[in-house]
Structure formats: C-alpha cells, structure tokens
C-alpha cells in the first residue's frame, strides 16, 4: 500500500491523541479558587489593650477615688477631726509683734479609742492671715514639754502644756484669735470615726493682742456755735404821734 495515501489519516489520529491527553491533564488540575477541604486554617489572634487600673483591688490596682471615711489619716481643724480640747494658759508679748502663748491640751475625760493619735500641724488665724506660728520654742518654763507645732497626743497622754510662738503679719490689727489644725492617725478607719464622733469641743480661741494699741485722739471740744443775731425787742413804749 502506498504510504502517501494514509498520511492524512495518521495525522488526524495523532491530533486526536494529543487533544485527549490535554483534556486528561486539565481534569486532574485543582480549581484555582476552590478551598482545600482537608486544609486547616491558621488561627489569627487580636491583642486587646490591658485594662487600666482605677482603684485598689486584689492585685494592688485602683477601683476609683478613695472614700474619705475609709482613710486612716485625716487632717483639718482639730475640733472637726477628733483632736484634743485646748485652753489658754497665758499669753505674753515678747516684742516686735511676737507673742509666747502657753497652751494646755487635754482629753477632758473623753479620750479617743486606742490606736489613735493626733498631731498639731499648725494654726488657723482669725481674721485670716493676721498671724502665723513658728515651730521654735519661746518659753523655758519647766512645765512646758516643747513647741505646740508638732506635738502629738495619744489616748493616754495626760494634760500637757506646750508653747506657741505667734508672729504678727502686716495685716495684724489690735488682736487676733488662734485655733489649731492637725492630723488624726488611726490603725483602722472605725477608730478615726469613733474619735471624730466624740462629744468634745476645742475650747475658746487663743487671743494675742497688741500691747500698745494706737491711742485714739481725745475728742475736740465742741465748737461754739456762732451767735445767732436776734431781732431787737420792740420797745414797749409806743412812739407819740
């Protein structure tokens, strides 16, 4: 048989085989956008910000502002914060706008609970700003324990006298009153509450006075009123016609 007569037929068969091979390979390839059912997705994590502590908690954080009634250290006017009553034991002017005041502190039979102390931190001036106080001593009397500023009273402290150096400011005039401020320290808040609830009063103010107040000018004698001219009385005698 002549080979030239069968060449077109062989070419067609070869093309058919090539096409079949291409289709077979295409059917075995994975679909590009189809997810592999056997694959396990990689988990993703998102970091969350740590909470900001706002108060005192089990781990030392903060849960909010501290309630003053839960504090074991409270400061302010002695009469309002459980401090001891006090009284004037004598005030002496020592010149140059200075006074040495002896002040007695006592519990007056109503001492606060145990584990409570009160320390004198300073004074309040009445009127405000008229005087200040120093931590220096101003008396050498044997009964004086030391300066009042910084003095601490405990529940078992007996009647005690301290000295207070009071200094006039430029706004001082004639006299000024002094009361005390301090800090109450307790081992537990309930002790502070009990100390403040005591029916105790601070006592009267400690007064300092100018030993040489300005003298008032004596009143000038009243000025004499100028004579008021008066009409001369009419003559009782009638003039003759």
Image: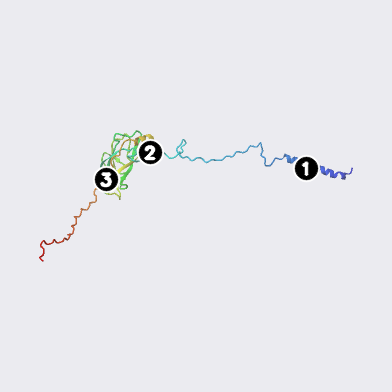
Quadrant in the picture for residue 240: bottom left
- For marks 3 and 1 on the same chain, the one whose residue lies earlier in the sequence: 1
Q: Which residue is mark 2?
A: 73
Q: Quadrant of the N terminus?
A: top right
In this view, the residue farthest toward the front is: 241
The answer to the question of whether label 3 and label 2 lie on touching residues, with beta carbons closer than 8 A, is no
Report how far apart the C-alphas of labels 3 and 1 lie in the structure: 122 Å
How crowded pointer 3 is (Cα within 10 Å; few <14, some 14-19, many 20+) is rated as many
Q: How is the image coloured?
A: rainbow
How crowded pointer 1 is (Cα within 10 Å; few <14, some 14-19, many 20+) is rated as few
> Would residue 5 be visible to someone looking at this image?
yes
How crowded pointer 2 is (Cα within 10 Å; few <14, some 14-19, many 20+) is rated as some
Task: Kindly state the secondary structure of the residue where label 3 is placed.
Answer: strand
In this view, the residue farthest toward the bottom is: 241
- For marks 1 and 2 on the same chain, the one whose residue lies earlier in the sequence: 1
Q: Is residue 101 left or right of residue 36?
A: left
Report how far apart the C-alphas of labels 1 and 2 lie in the structure: 96 Å
In this view, the mark in front (1 or 2): 1
Report how far apart the C-alphas of labels 3 and 2 lie in the structure: 31 Å
Q: Which residue is mark 3?
A: 208
Residue 222 lies, in percent from the top left, at 19, 55
Task: Kindly state the secondary structure of the residue where label 2 is placed.
Answer: strand
- For marks 3 and 2 on the same chain, the one whose residue lies earlier in the sequence: 2
Quadrant in the picture for residue 200: top left
Q: Which residue is mark 1?
A: 19
Q: Is residue 196 left or right of residue 140?
A: right
Residue 71 has which mark? none
């Amino acid at each position: 048989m002549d080979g030239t007569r069968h060449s077109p037929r062989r070419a067609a068969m070869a093309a058919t085989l090539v096409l079949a091979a291409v289709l077979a390979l295409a059917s075995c390839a994975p679909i590009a956008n189809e997810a592999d059912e056997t694959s396990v997705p990689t988990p993703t994590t998102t970091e969350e910000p740590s909470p900001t502590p706002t108060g005192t908690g089990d781990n030392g954080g903060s849960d909010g502002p501290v309630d003053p009634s839960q504090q074991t250290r409270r400061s302010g006017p002695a009469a309002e914060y459980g401090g001891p009553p006090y009284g004037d034991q004598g005030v002496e002017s020592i010149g140059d706008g200075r006074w040495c005041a002896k002040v007695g502190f006592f519990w007056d039979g109503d001492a606060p609970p145990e584990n409570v102390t009160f320390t004198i931190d300073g004074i309040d001036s009445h009127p405000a700003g008229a005087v200040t106080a120093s931590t220096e001593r101003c008396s050498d009397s044997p009964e004086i324990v030391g300066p009042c500023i910084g003095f601490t009273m405990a529940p078992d402290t007996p009647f005690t006298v301290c000295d207070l150096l009071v200094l006039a400011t430029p706004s001082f005039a004639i006299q000024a009153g002094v009361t005390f401020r301090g800090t109450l320290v307790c081992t537990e808040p309930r002790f502070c509450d009990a100390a403040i609830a005591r029916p105790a009063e601070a006592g009267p103010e400690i007064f300092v006075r100018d030993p040489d107040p300005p003298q008032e000018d004596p009143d000038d004698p009243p000025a004499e009123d100028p004579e008021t001219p008066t009409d001369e009385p009419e003559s009782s005698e009638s003039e003759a016609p």
